[in-house]
Image (cartoon, rainbow, N blue to C red):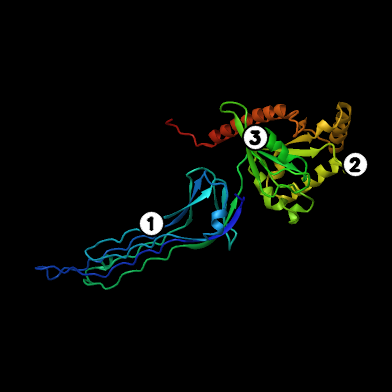
Amino acid sequence: MKFVDEAVIKVEAGDGGNGCVGFRREKYIPKGGPDGGDGGDGGSVYLIGDEGLNTLVDFRHIRSHRAERGQNGMGRQMTGRKGEDKLVRVPVGTRVTDADTEELIGEVLADGQRLLVAQGGHHGLGNIHFKSSTNRAPRQATSGTPGERRRLHLELIVLADVGLLGMPNAGKSSLIAKVSAARPKIADYPFTTLYPNLGVVSLGRDRSFVIADIPGVIEGAAEGAGLGIQFLKHLSRTRLLLHLVDIAPLNEDVDPADEVGRIWAEVQKFGGDLASRERWLVLNKIDLLTDEDYAERRDSLVAALHWQGPVYGISAVSGEGTDRLMGDLMQRIETLKADEQVVEHDDEPWDPLA
């Protein structure tokens, strides 16, 4: 199935039901008085997370979603039935903004999570609410308020622990295919990857993490060049970045240090806190070099970049070095998750009765 990560839809909440103007008419009760009931509230529109979905492709065909209108009030003080809510299933990781105002409405980050995107209208009041000592037979009632109507911009941002960053043809797709069950398209030309791929790296029972492969980023991506700007956002929720570098380029004029610098400049231009993510340097295609040549090129690259973080050498094709890399990633992710849980616990208000 084609990966679709953006869509614009229209949502309409139900209008509130109108109040009723009614009077009691029963035998032997000549002065029954007003008995018009209230209308029902209009149904609201909710987005609900569904981990079984992985694209927004369905919203390219079904663009309008409407909740039910509230029923009008009736005589004998009977309240109209509330309109049914409209539940719209979306993939986990969907960010929702107002397409007209660009206001961020919220994000759906868990299976079963509900996000209110259009509030149903409020019910109208029946004439029973307007009786008084001076107005024994009120003939006024209020109409229900209209439900919210919005155009929503949906963006699916994949939820991954590790994101792969690198130039086109750096070997990102080959790496994710080697270490997981994902099977992205792999070819000997750039821009093979046209949409994000997710792979689950399993290192034993209850020890796994998700790795994301996005289309290669080129210079000018932050201004819209190539595919990078469309998918850099998919790295914004990762805990750690792997910056893949082709350490044995076929073109001898290619400078790996220059490529790393250009990509990182685009990440910094992209904004947000993506540039603050922890980043590891991964030198790919070491199987094409002798040990001496690899060590020389690695040391030269580290010196040119003034690199202070971890450096790994791998071959995404043969698998050399990938086991060590994945094992270290798993340990680091477990540490980061433990730290996040500690922070969340510290943020909880102190309960003196606990």
- Image quadrant holding the C terminus, namely top left
Q: Quadrant of residue 331?
A: top right
Can you give x and y, in whole percent of width and height, for residue 118 in the image? Answer: 47, 58
- Front residue of 105/157: it is 157
At label 3, which amino acid type do we have? Answer: Ser
Q: Quadrant of residue 203?
A: top right
Q: Secondary structure at mark 1?
A: loop
Please rate how many residues cluster around mark 2, counting C-alpha atoms within 10 Å: few if below 14, some from 14 to 19, many from 20: few
Can you give x and y, in whole percent of width and height, for residue 31 in the image? Answer: 14, 70
Residue for point 26% across, 65% down? 74
Can you give x and y, in whole percent of width and height, for residue 202 in the image? Answer: 61, 30
Q: Residue furthest right?
A: 253
Q: Which residue position holds label 2?
A: 252
Please rate how many residues cluster around mark 3, counting C-alpha atoms within 10 Å: few if below 14, some from 14 to 19, many from 20: some
Residue 152 visible in the snapshot: no
Can you give x and y, in whole percent of width and height, for residue 6 in the image? Answer: 61, 55
